[in-house]
Image (spheres, rainbow, N blue to C red):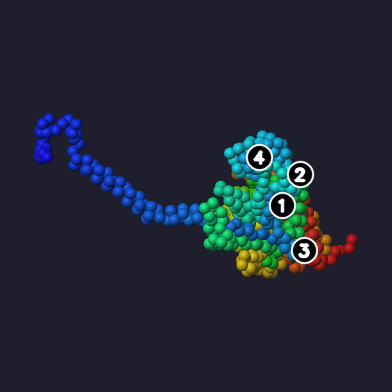
Amino acid sequence: MHRVTISIGRNHKPTKKHFSTRNQVKTPRIERTTILRAVFLLFASVLIVRLFVVMVLQHEDYVALAEGQRTLREKLIPRRGRIYVQDPKSENRLYAIAENQELAMIYANPRQIVDPKMTTEKLAPMLGIPHEELYQKLSKQNDIYEPIGKKISDAQKQAIETMALPGIDFVKEEWRFYPEGGITSHITGFVGFNESGEQIGQYGLEQYFDKELSGKSGFIHTERDASGRWIALGKQLIEEAQDGYDFVLTIDKNVQYVTCTKLREAAEKYNSKRGTAIVMDPKTGALRAVCSYPAFDANTYNETSDISVYTNVAIASEWEPGSVFKAFTMAAALDQGKVTPNTTYHDEGFVKVGKYTIRNSDGRKQDRMVDMKFVLQQSLNTGAIFAQQQIGNQSWLDYVKKFGFGEKTGIELISEAAGNVSNLEKLSDVYAATSTYGQGIQVTPMQMINGFAAIANNGALMKPYIVEEVQLNNGYRVQTYPQKIRDVITPQTARTLSAMLVSVIDEGHTKSAQVKGYFMAGKTGTAQIAKTDGRGYDETKHNDTFIGFGPVSDPRFVILVRLDEPVGVQWADTSVAPVFREIADFLVDYYGIPPDKVEKES
């Protein structure tokens, strides 16, 4: 055995005497060991980091993944709350105008369809789907679930099931159903879908109270086996769904139907662009009817091409009201004690306000002394201006705001407008003058009827409301109580003004609003429409309004009727006053109100 000493230096070269070519080492042993150690350390470091990430940083994620493989989590859908209206003549006294209905959804499993062409020929006519469109859906061989129709009626479902078509089946879906269709659509709104495909309330009460109506989803957690099936005796945890609240409205089903029908008939008769009619209890502010024209069917809302019909004209439209506003002008002057029904002024048919000349609606020159009662009867612009000038611009602005103009009423409906009376804040003589007959300001129908309700209610302004009761899912009920906002005018002023408004109907040019056997109070408004360029008014178009209440001895209702741009009629006493009479005729009979007026024998 030879002992070999190896000396390694920069210039040292092994000789053939010591090593053969076969046994030469190109990489020294120490370098190879170092590399192996480095590789091992790198691998160990990566492994340690990965273990740290998995066991510490991503621990919860992997636990959840494992739990998800071992358990099932099923979402429990709550029942959406119903919306009811009053139906005093029925046994239940309530009637649902928004409820839930289970309908079938038909779907196909193309993998199981034997003959797509034959199946298409049988189903396409029944489902109302173009043949080519349905055939393409049924021919997707890699698809196992293809919805082909929703809201399938029981009759359709039964007819299709009798065909026994392979690959065709049904599942139940819950849909919102509106039994009254277009009669209450502007009140309810509808349930549509958001971008995620989830149901969501849109417009009306469905949107305003979407959270309360929707309820809260629940969940059921349970264990499953390796095949993914539920284990009957496995551990279960149930989070119960909380159903949505039910809402009971102040709306009367029968009053709503009659009011909306009369509005539609008048709007169609005069080819009106749009319109609204409202019935309110003046003593409480409770709404008995809220109608807008044109209407839409909430069940088929998606078939409506013009979404502007979704707008509730009663609360969202702002317009210059015209002469119907003179009732508030007279209320302010009477309340300040500056005029009485017998106060007179010299009417020349026009009046100068600054550099402007304002005329009565008939445009005629006059030379007469007339009283305030006559001003309302004949709807004289000059007389309204005279009354306002007696109290001054600031006092007039104060009364306008006290009646609630320029702010929302707070009604429980979406998209209420506030109107605009900012011109009056300038305290300009001309703006004050034109506002006395309803020009240069913007109001909403809801504000107008609420203001008239204050006159009928001895000067007390109430908060309008449409929800009478909320029925919680725990059995409790939350009642809405009438809310007084403020006293606007004194009871004496209200009674005096009411008598003057009676004379408008009985002695003025609005006899078309008379209800036989009853004293009714009211005022018309034939309002000019401002030009789109802001320069003056369009002489060819107008909006017609009538607001009245009765019986005056004990007012039970206030009615507003408005038509936008009626065609073939010049004055509101011809277009909308008769609609008031028809609705009032129905109400005195429906409520069983005894007559308060003795008719003179002819």
Amino acid carrying label 3: it is Ser
Find out whether the residues at labels 2 and 3 contact each other: C-beta distance under 8 Å: no
Secondary structure category for the residue under label 2? loop
Tell me the tag on residue 90: 3
Q: In front: 318, or 331?
A: 318
Disc 4: which residue: 113
Find out whether the residues at labels 3 and 4 contact each other: C-beta distance under 8 Å: no
- C-alpha distance separating marks 2 and 3: 41 Å
Q: Indicate the position of residue 108 as horizontal and vertical percent values.
A: 65, 43
Query: Of marks 2 and 4, which one's residue comes earlier in the chain?
Result: 4
Residue name at image x 55 percent, y 48 percent: 196
Tell me the tag on residue 409: none
Amino acid carrying label 4: it is Ile
Disc 2: which residue: 568
Disc 1: which residue: 181
Query: Of marks 3 and 4, which one's residue comes earlier in the chain?
Result: 3
